[in-house]
Amino acid sequence: MIDKFNKNELDEVMNIWLNTNIDAHDFIPKDYWIKNYNVVKEQYIPIAKTFVYKENNIIIAFISIIEASFIGALFVKKEYQRQGIGLKLINHCKTLYPILKLAVYVDNINSVKFYKRCNFKVKAEQDNESSGFKEYIMSWDK
């Protein structure tokens, strides 16, 4: 079930963010994610419109949209991946926003494939400003 994020769910969402980032980006040192944890928690989540996906009242995934178009986060707990939950969150946002954009690491092959299956197109390739690793800028529109 997709629901609006509630501030008292912040720690649960951030645990998913940290653990999934470390797992999905084994090419980036774990310390990078740990150092950025508070920045995401204190600066990005508060300005984003976040939706959570719950099963039995437990958050297993979330998506955060910044400035009504940029997907700043889409994370599904590892044990729930490849079950269509990320697609449900993307499709929910497609009903709310006419344009969606995102940045995804080039080396995160599974995520790149996922976004392509969701009809996102690569618009540019650049170095991520913070980590220095290559990323794609992708977008979708109605």
Image: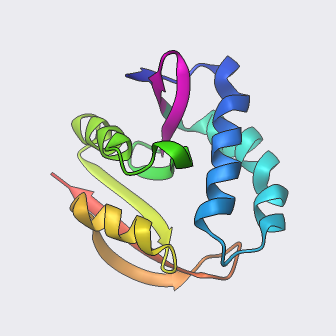
- The residue at the point 71 percent across, 47 percent down is 40
Secondary structure character of the magenta stretch overall: strand
Looking at the image, the residue that sits furthest to the left is: 142
The boundaries of the magenta stretch are: 51-65
Relative to 61, is 84 on the left or the right? left
Residue 4 in the image, given as x and y percentages of width and height: 47, 22
Relative to 92, is 40 on the left or the right? right
Q: Quadrant of the N terminus?
A: top left
Q: Is residue 117 magenta?
A: no
- The residue at the point 46 percent across, 22 percent down is 55
Relative to 89, is 59 on the left or the right? right
Asked if 69 appears above or below 120 in the picture, the reply is above
- The residue at the point 24 percent across, 57 percent down is 118
Which residue occupies the foreground of this view, 142 or 37? 37
Image quadrant in which you'd find residue 26: bottom right
Residue 85 in the image, given as x and y percentages of width and height: 36, 40
- The residue at the point 66 percent across, 78 percent down is 27
Asked if 3 appears above or below 15 in the picture, the reply is above
Image quadrant in which you'd find residue 6: top right
Which residue occupies the foreground of this view, 142 or 135? 135
Relative to 130, is 119 on the left or the right? left
Image quadrant in which you'd find residue 41: top right
Asked if 94 appears above or below 123 in the picture, the reply is above
